[in-house]
Amino acid sequence: MTKDVLVTISGLQFSKDSGEAPEPVEVTCPGTYYKKNDKHYVVYEEIIEGFDGVTKNTLKLQPGSLDIMKRGVSNVHMVFEKNKKNRTCYNMPFGSLMMGIDAKGVVVEESEHHIHASVSYELEMNYEKMADCEINIDIRSKGIGDFQLA
């Protein structure tokens, strides 16, 4: 894996009450990759529409586990571990929420220039189930394969 990567994060949220079909959300952005103590780290910045400043995101991936740490406009440390419920406080510009994450499945696959993580989890807000969710994260070496730059 090269230091410069492209990160694509896509997700679905199946609301418990709406009965509506979920709408996928996808974002692709440049990031920086490094490996330390057999864990993969990816750092990238995110801009939240309508707010000044950026949020620095750090992904920590290892077999069976994903951590997402956000610092800046919003702040949170989310931990996804299979068959384990984790709670965290999600601080956003408009307030804070107690968030529960009950990961049902966490799969991390890697090859020379690609890492793919897939997470399915139940999301709680303020101790009430809100939705069943899925996140897919693709990390690819910049300039390799489908993302070849001219």
Image: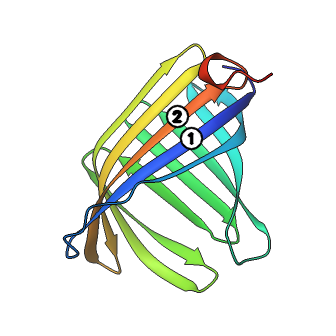
Name the residue rendered at 39%, 49% in the picture. 80
Q: Is residue 79 left or right of residue 15?
A: right
- Percent position (x, y) of residue 2? 72, 21
Give the quadrant of residue 41. Answer: top right
> In the image shown, does 34 or 73 lie closer to the viewer?
73
Q: Tell me if mark 1 has few (under 14), some (14-19) or many (20+) residues whose alpha carbon lies within 10 angstroms of its own.
A: some
- Percent position (x, y) of residue 8? 56, 41
> In the image shown, does 126 or 28 lie closer to the viewer?
28
Which mark, residue 8? 1
Image: 70 above or below 109: below
Q: Quadrant of the N terminus?
A: top right
- Percent position (x, y) of residue 52? 79, 75
> In the image shown, does 92 or 76 lie closer to the viewer?
92
- The colour mode here is rainbow
> In the image shown, does 120 or 66 lie closer to the viewer?
120
Q: Is residue 79 left or right of residue 103?
A: right
Q: Tell me if mark 2 has few (under 14), some (14-19) or many (20+) residues whose alpha carbon lies within 10 angstroms of its own.
A: some
Residue 41 visible in the displayed image: yes
Image: 146 above or below 103: above
Which mark, residue 138? 2
Image: 21 above or below 63: below
Mark 1 lies on a secondary structure that is strand
- Percent position (x, y) of residue 13? 33, 60
Residue type indicated by callout 2:
Asp
Q: Residue furthest bottom?
A: 94
